[in-house]
Image: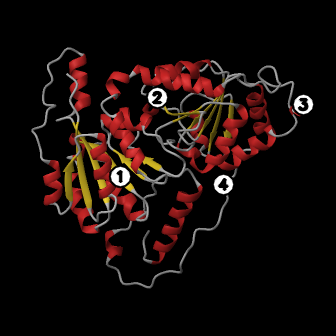
């Protein structure tokens, strides 16, 4: 932009991109000379109302035909499916399809629902099941390595993808049926076609038609959950009682922010159940240490009426621990739960697994509760899940940040 008058148009254009295209940050650059310029402002510009188009026509009917005839269907939901939560649940129930989500899709479908596998794409058991499904509907996800923790599995069934951004159809596994459009309206269109008498769509593409349903999808999901949990039971046992205590205290619409810490990506992502009313903010794909605390401050500032809790490790927290000063200045109740394993556990475990002697991964002991008090907040230590529940309940009603440590024995 070259004048003050153009600023209004630039802001309106940014909000149009933000609200009506693929959601992501929009950058506005204001030249330094305009920041101090004294000129008349231009007219107020408002982003025009627009409706995101959904996929339709033969593309939706062909996809519905595949889903209707599937004996082993599956839904994979990413962050792009969040506005279609109700429709996705209806679709899963109508198809008898288990639902697995990416990290960004956590909680789109209530993770206590009998069809919900939660954040489990990284599980070998779940990946083997997904590979054997005869129809996979992926909504608002890239099916990327950041969610799978490995290369995407070679799907043997028909892949259907719904995405607002047509460019995403060229990323990740290629779909047999690409449906480009808004997730909510496209899922609604699929449900409408599936509700029609099956005779209209029988005969069918990609194989036989005819309303075949898996005999016990809830039983399949229960078995897959058990298999997923058995794979990592020894590793994850150190976090699970404490995560259950966190969940028991929080309201259904609570917001949790997560660091790039073992207690979060191994612990909370798959094992702390969330419903559609809540949110879980995780630095997916970037491995960002120190994300949880500033993200929690932002979430609590935006939604002061909702409970917000930051989950972190001692190593990650110290990348941004100075933001406790910001939280103290704001005076908003903000619990920060820190699982302290005395250093960088992921790197330490990787070294040990290779037979190396761990080097430069242990941190000297830091009294983190005292540090929180030094910044003007509160701090305490929880030596049991019950103690964490009590401390968290108090912190949710106490102005300012409260840092609560949980000692986590490092794996040697």
- What's the CA distance linking mark 1 and mark 2? 26 Å
Across and down, in percent, residue 50 comes to: 66, 62
Q: Which residue is mark 4?
A: 52
Across and down, in percent, residue 105 comes to: 51, 42
Q: Which residue is mark 3?
A: 199
Position of 294 compared to 86: left or right? left
Position of 409 compared to 246: left or right? left
For discs 3 and 1, the disc positioned in front in the rendered view: 1
For discs 4 and 3, the disc positioned in front in the rendered view: 3
Mark linked to residue 148:
2
Q: Earlier in the sequence, mark 2 or mark 3?
A: 2
Across and down, in percent, residue 141 comes to: 55, 38
Coloration mode: secondary structure
Q: Which residue is mark 1?
A: 309
Q: Mark 4 falls on what kind of element?
A: loop
Q: Mark 2 falls on what kind of element?
A: helix
Q: Mark 3 falls on what kind of element?
A: helix
For discs 2 and 4, the disc positioned in front in the rendered view: 2
- What's the CA distance linking mark 2 and mark 4? 29 Å
- What's the CA distance linking mark 4 and mark 3? 31 Å
Seen at 57% across and 72% down, the residue is: 46
Q: Are marks 2 and 3 in contact (CB under 8 Å)?
A: no
Q: Residues within 10 Å of mark 1 (few under 14, many from 20)?
A: many
């Amino acid at each position: 932009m070259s004048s003050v008058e153009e600023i209004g148009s630039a802001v309106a254009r940014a909000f149009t991109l933000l609200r009506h295209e693929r959601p992501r940050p929009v950058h506005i650059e204001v030249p330094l000379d305009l920041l101090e310029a004294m000129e008349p402002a231009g007219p107020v510009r408002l982003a025009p109302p627009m409706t995101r188009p959904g996929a339709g026509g033969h593309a939706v009917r062909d996809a519905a035909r595949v889903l209707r005839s599937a004996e082993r269907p599956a839904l994979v939901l990413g962050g792009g499916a969040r506005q279609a939560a109700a429709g996705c649940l209806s679709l899963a129930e109508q198809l008898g399809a288990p639902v697995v989500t990416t990290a960004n899709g956590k909680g789109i479908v209530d993770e206590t629902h009998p069809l919900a596998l939660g954040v489990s794409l990284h599980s070998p058991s779940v990946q083997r099941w997904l590979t054997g499904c005869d129809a996979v509907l992926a909504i608002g996800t890239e099916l990327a390595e950041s969610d799978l923790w490995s290369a995407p599995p070679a799907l043997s069934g028909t892949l259907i993808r719904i995405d607002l951004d047509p460019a995403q159809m060229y990323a990740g596994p290629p779909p047999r049926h690409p449906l480009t459009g808004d997730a909510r309206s496209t899922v609604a269109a699929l449900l409408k076609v599936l509700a029609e008498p099956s005779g209209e769509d029988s005969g069918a593409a990609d194989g036989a038609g005819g309303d075949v349903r898996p005999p016990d999808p809830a039983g399949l999901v229960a078995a897959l959950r058990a298999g997923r949990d058995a794979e990592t039971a020894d590793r994850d046992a150190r976090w699970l009682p404490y995560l259950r205590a966190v969940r028991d205290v929080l309201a259904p619409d609570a917001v949790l922010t997560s660091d790039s810490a073992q207690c979060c990506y191994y612990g909370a992502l798959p094992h702390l159940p969330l419903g559609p009313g809540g949110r879980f903010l995780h630095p997916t794909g970037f491995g960002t240490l120190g994300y949880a605390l500033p993200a929690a401050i932002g979430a609590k500032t935006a939604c002061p009426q909702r409970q917000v809790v930051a989950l972190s490790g001692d190593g990650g927290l110290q990348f941004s621990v100075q933001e406790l000063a910001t939280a103290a200045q704001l005076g908003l109740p903000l619990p920060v739960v820190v699982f302290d394993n005395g250093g960088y556990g992921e790197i330490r475990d990787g070294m040990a697994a290779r037979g190396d002697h761990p080097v430069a991964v242990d941190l000297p002991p830091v009294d983190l509760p005292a540090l929180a008090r030094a910044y003007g907040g509160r701090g305490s230590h929880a030596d049991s899940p019950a103690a964490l529940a009590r401390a968290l309940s108090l912190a949710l009603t106490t102005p300012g940040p409260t840092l609560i440590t949980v000692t986590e024995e490092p794996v040697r």
